[in-house]
Amino acid sequence: MPSNMELRRISATPSPATGVRTAPTVAKLIDTTTCIGCKACEVACQEWNDLFNVETELEPSREFGSYQTMPDLTANFWNLIRFNEHVEKRPDGSEKFHWLMAKDQCMHCDDPGCLKACPAPGAIVQYTNGVVDFQQEHCIGCEYCVTGCPFDIPRLHKRTKKVYKCTLCTDRLAYGLEPACIKACPTGCLEFGTKEHLVQIANARVEQLKHNGYEKAAIYDPPGVGGTGVIYVLGLGDQPELYGLPKDPHVPWTVSVWKHALKPIGSLLMIGALLGTIIHYVRYGRNEAPGMRKADREEV
Amino acid sequence: MSQEVMTQSQLATLAREKEDLVVNGLLVRHTAAVRLTHWLVAIFFSLSLFTGFVIFTPFFAGWAGVFGGGPMVRTLHPWFALGFTIAVFFLYRYWKTKMRKESGDEEWKDNFGPYIRYESELQNVGKYNAGQKIYFWAVFWGAIAFLASGIVMWFPTAFPYFLRTVSYWLHEITFVAFVIGIIYHIYMSTTAMPGTFRAMTRGTVTKDWAKWHHARWYREVTGEKK
């Protein structure tokens, strides 16, 4: 097993994760300003992961349709280029249409809400390289991860009743290959590497964009989830919502309180109740009706 | 009070249909229908409890194997729980009138301390004491809380995000309350109070037991004066 595939975190497992070897945190960089919406990454994802049988759907709510392949991610469609339509109002009163392309997929959070919410031991793991991966053979299909995910990524498969999402091509990474989507990108708007390196590239790109008139350009690497393994360069960096990205995502506090407060307190109360009966019995014994015979006591 | 001595099987037949009467020097406390319903509640509760524990904490993840693995636990738990809810509903139909507030209830509550120290000898205790009534209504409302939150958790993505998180909390809190409740329910009906458990197996209790634990019910059934 390569060192980057050792485990940093394991869902629902009280004992420590097994990884001892270190590996650099890897990431994908998505430069939304140079994405041309060719969807090569979507095809590469489907091909590499052998996810066929996906029919293109049009979003029923859109009157004039859309260039987008699918309305949403599905259990066998893990990488969706969203053609977010944005009309910019210019100071001179004119309007300019923009496609704010976003590559919707698992963000591979450093602090993954899905893993925190998961009750099935080993169903969600995080490798030492930061990649968050679902192990479907351990998944019980409860969909807690769907509620734990701040980006609404995991999808339950109707037949298998397991959740699926982008694996960041762990099966390619293990052999030193870059993810399939990166390999297919023709404009170079997708890059793969260590996170440290990609942040440098992204910063340089943001400076360039600012110089070219995108004053609000910024990196999207939300600190609320410890940073993500998928980072964006956004032309309109002050409004990530326009790209379908939450402004300040966190592991939902309801999930954290549920897992880190309700469960331990509840467990203590239950153990306390059990101890309470023992203490009560030792202190007060039985409440036996006077006159009760031995036979009455023993009859069930 | 019938002086006629019945055979065990005659007694069993009678206790199947009628309660609150004296037969062979024993008081019939629960009809067979009530006992059966209670056992259905108990069985479905246990099945829901053990499958629920697998999902509640990884420390009990190993129990999943008993039910055919984690995915089977996830599949079965809602159905076991549905059985529990239906059984509780039937128990509610039997007991809703009997679990109403009565004259001695306040007195019993005021004597809760002496009661758990076995120091109270209250005379105005009917067939069910106030504690049993509180437990029954807690189970009834708890079952409703379980059902409402459980349906959301059964099909989480069919419900809005807010409802899902509320349900996870509600299910969790109800679960802990139920486990604490069931621990004391079983403790009190077996170890702590000998002679009680047979009320749910044979359906009958001894006179001594009835006089001691449910004095007014004893007087009502036997016709004896204080």
Image (cartoon, coloured by chain):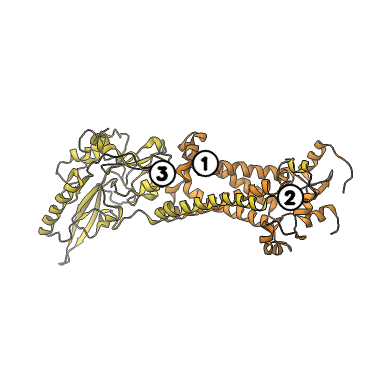
Q: Is residue A107 left or right of residue B187?
A: left
Q: Is residue B20 visible?
A: no
Tag of residue A288: 2
Q: Is residue A136 left or right of residue A236?
A: right
* Residue on which disc 3 sits: A14
Residue under disc 3 on the same chain as residue under disc 2: yes
Q: Is residue A274 visible?
A: yes
* Label 3, residues with CA under 10 Å away: few <14, some 14-19, many ≥20: few
Tag of residue B51: 1
Q: Where, quadrant-wise, is the C terminus of chain B in this rendering?
A: bottom right
Q: Are marks 1 and 2 in contact (CB under 8 Å)?
A: no
The subunit carrying tag 3 is A
- Which SS class for mark 3? loop
The amino acid type of the residue labelled 3 equals Pro
* Label 2, residues with CA under 10 Å away: few <14, some 14-19, many ≥20: some
Letter of the orange chain: B
| Residue located at (41% from left, 44% from top) | A14
Q: Residue lying farthest bottom?
A: A92
- Which SS class for mark 2? loop
| Residue located at (68% from left, 49% from top) | B192
The subunit carrying tag 2 is A
Spatial CA distance of label 3 from label 1 is 19 Å
Q: Nearer the viewer, mark 1 or mark 2?
A: 2
Q: Nearer the viewer, mark 3 or mark 1?
A: 3
In the rendered view, tell whether residue A248 sits above or below residue A157: below
Letter of the yellow chain: A
* Label 1, residues with CA under 10 Å away: few <14, some 14-19, many ≥20: many
